[in-house]
Each structure stands twice: as structure tokens, then as C-alpha cells.
Image (cartoon, helix red, strand yellow):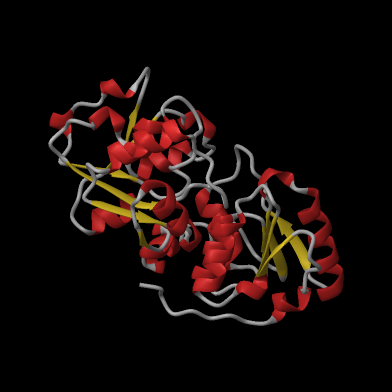
Amino acid sequence: MTTKLKELGYFPYIIGTVWKRFNNIEFINQTTNLVIIKNNFSEIKQKDYDILMVNSDQTWVKYDEFFYDYGFLQFAEFWNITKIVYGASIGSDTWQFSEKDETIMKRLLKKFSGISVREKGSIELIKKHLDIVPELVLDPTFLIDKKYYLDLIKDLKDKIQITKKYIFVYNIANDQYIINSMKNASEELNLEINYFPLNNDSSVSKFIYYLINSKAVITNSYHGTVFSIIFNKPFLTIYNRFNSKERYISLGNSINVKERIFERNQKPNYQLLIIDIYFEQLI
């Protein structure tokens, strides 16, 4: 999102509290300006900003005690400043909030000039419980021209030689079902597996490089699915009941690839991995 905002002429900052969770902190530091909260959001001062935006992804999920701050900008409730929500996700197919939550969320959202969500299925839930009808928007990953991602990997071609055809596997939380699926797909299609590790050696550029050079993708990641679509890679996305299926279903329906996105209790059609897909830039 910060990349798109820069293209539009803004000077964005990311404000956060949990950067230690990210393997790619170096990449984040290189591509944006970070403000890390040490204690609480009262450290943020109005004079430093012209606009406040709640970013995309699962920013309307109650991760910790800062929920009203990072999701609804409670720390700036009385500031005379433009507030926007772009592409928020509630991270669930059902409403997870109490009446107390609803009261506070309604009060805070009245101060926003624009509210949008990432999943179509969330719109009715939000309308029912908060009396707000948000707009439906694309995940910001789709808003950036492919050239940006290609520039990230231009130095890897000489460093990492690709000599074999393979299925790229991006497996969040090391799901055994994905491991079994990639083995079955490898045997059926006679393709090798390139399993992308989630460790300190992984990076955004390597992720994109290996995905672009693959013949197909198997994943249980939302953004693994998004990048497969951006780069027109045949893919299968396998989610489970804990994954918040609405975000996958909404994405699949919006660009007519729902047959490639399915729950883990369904039998995968591995032949889809050798059927090409192609999308024009979605913006």
C-alpha cells in the first residue's frame, strides 16, 4: 500500500507495534518509513500527519489490547484530521464482536470519510451490525504495476539459476495437508517441488523470484494466491475452516477462478496446475 501511496505523491509511514513478528523487517525498512510504538498509541502526535489510514489485510481482527487503535484509530478520535479505511478484513466468515465492541466501532467509524473492505461477504455483516455500507476494493497488492515486483528480483537471475521445471509450494503454518497435496501433484504431473521455507533466510524477493519461475503454485496463503494471479501462474489454493474462507471465495468469484480455490476436505484437481490462466492488470 505504501508503494501505491508514493506513486500518488504521498509520503507514507507505517505505524505498528509488533514488527518482531516479521522475517522481512529489513525489506520493510528499505521500502517504507516505520514508526514503532513502544508503549501505546498516545505516542503518535497529530502534528506529524495530514491523513490517517487503516490499512488493508486483517486490520479488523482483535489481536490485542490495541484493537481500537490500529483498527479504528481510537487514539485520534478527537483529532481534526482525515481518516480512511482501505480494504480492511474482519478475518472471519461470522461476526466475532461483542455489543460493547459494536458500540465503540460505530462511534469511531462515524469520524471516517471513507470506509472500504476487501471481502464481499463482509459487507452484509458490517451493514447488519454497524449500520455502515463499506465499498468493496482490491487488495493493495493488485494496485501496483508488475514492474515494481520485477525490479525487486532483477539481481537474483545471476545468483540463483533455475534449471528444472517445478511446482512452487508456499505453505503457511506447515500444514500437513499441503505437504501431502504437493507430493500427490508432483507424482501425477511429473514435476519437481520447490518448497519455499518460512525462516530467516526467506525474503520477499526470493519468494517472488521462485514463484515467477515456477510452472504452477500450490498454497494455503491468501497472498500466495494473489501473486499467482498477478503473474498468471496456474495455482491451487487449499484453505481450511480456520483460514477465513470468505477472503478466498470472494477473490475466486471476483475473477472467476473459484474452481482453483477449495477447502481441504475436497479432492484437488491437480490437472488445473497445467492449464494456463491469464489476467490483464486488474486496475
Residue 88, percent from left and from top? 41, 50
Residue 152, percent from left and from top? 44, 57
* Left-right relation of 167 to 10: right
| Residue that appears at 25% across and 43% down | 110
Name the quarter where the C terminus is drawn. bottom left
| Residue that appears at 35% across and 24% down | 37
Any part of residue 108 in sight: yes
Of residues 97 and 116, the one drawn nearer to the viewer in this rendering: 97
Residue 192, percent from left and from top? 78, 65
Residue 63, percent from left and from top? 51, 32
Q: Where on the picture, by quarter, is residue 216?
A: bottom right
| Residue that appears at 18% across and 55% down | 9
Residue that protrudes farthest toward the top in the picture: 39
| Residue that appears at 19% across and 26% down | 45
Any part of residue 215 in sight: no
- Picture layout, residue 282 above or below residue 35: below
* Left-right relation of 259 to 65: right
